[in-house]
Image: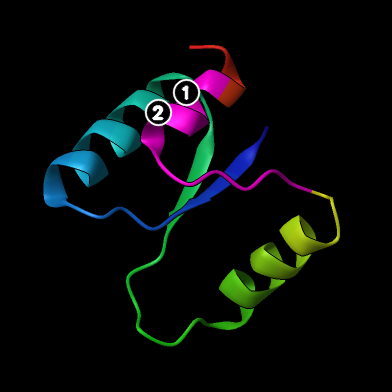
Amino acid sequence: MATILIKPKTKSEYNLLTRLLKKMNIEIQVVEESMPNYETLKAIEDVENKKGIRTKNSKELFDTLGI
């Protein structure tokens, strides 16, 4: 199962992404704290070390996932 770490910009983006990705059986972690916790920092580090993909917005995420 893939894991996606998201930091939505709006409540509507949060709702859309969480519902859609859960239906696709993709685990998500929503960043809500101003200072990242250990798991968030680890996910960011994984992306920086090319173990993940970073996208700027939901459109780019959907394009990356082929939706």
Nearest to the observer: residue 25 or residue 32: 32
- x and y percent of residue 53 in the render? 69, 43
User: In the figure, 63 relative to 49: above or below?
Assistant: above
Q: In the orientation shown, which residue stands out farthest toward the left?
A: 12
Residue kind at label 2, given as amino acid type: Lys
Q: Is residue 34 magenta?
A: no
Residue appearing at x 55%, y 43% in the figure? 55
Element under disc 2: helix
Residue kind at label 1, given as amino acid type: Phe
> Are there few (<14), some (14-19), or many (20+) residues within 10 Å of tag 2?
few
Element under disc 1: helix
Q: How many marks overall?
A: 2
- x and y percent of residue 33 in the render? 35, 79
- Name the disc covering residue 38, or none: none
Location of mark 1 (residue): 62
Q: Is residue 2 left or right of residue 37?
A: right
- Name the disc covering residue 59, or none: 2
Spatial CA distance of label 1 from label 2 is 5 Å
Q: In the orientation shown, which residue stands out farthest toward the top?
A: 67
Q: Is residue 53 left or right of residue 15?
A: right
Find residue 35 and report its image quarter.
Answer: bottom left
Query: Do tag 1 and tag 2 residues touch (Cβ < 8 Å)?
Result: yes
Nearest to the observer: residue 14 or residue 22: 14
Residue appearing at x 53%, y 31% in the figure? 26
Question: Quadrant where the N terminus lies?
Answer: top right
- x and y percent of residue 10 in the render? 17, 52
User: In the figure, 24 relative to 11: above or below?
Assistant: above
- x and y percent of residue 22 in the render? 40, 30
Residue appearing at x 49%, y 31% in the figure? 60
Q: Is residue 18 left or right of residue 28?
A: left
State which region is magenta. Answer: 52-63
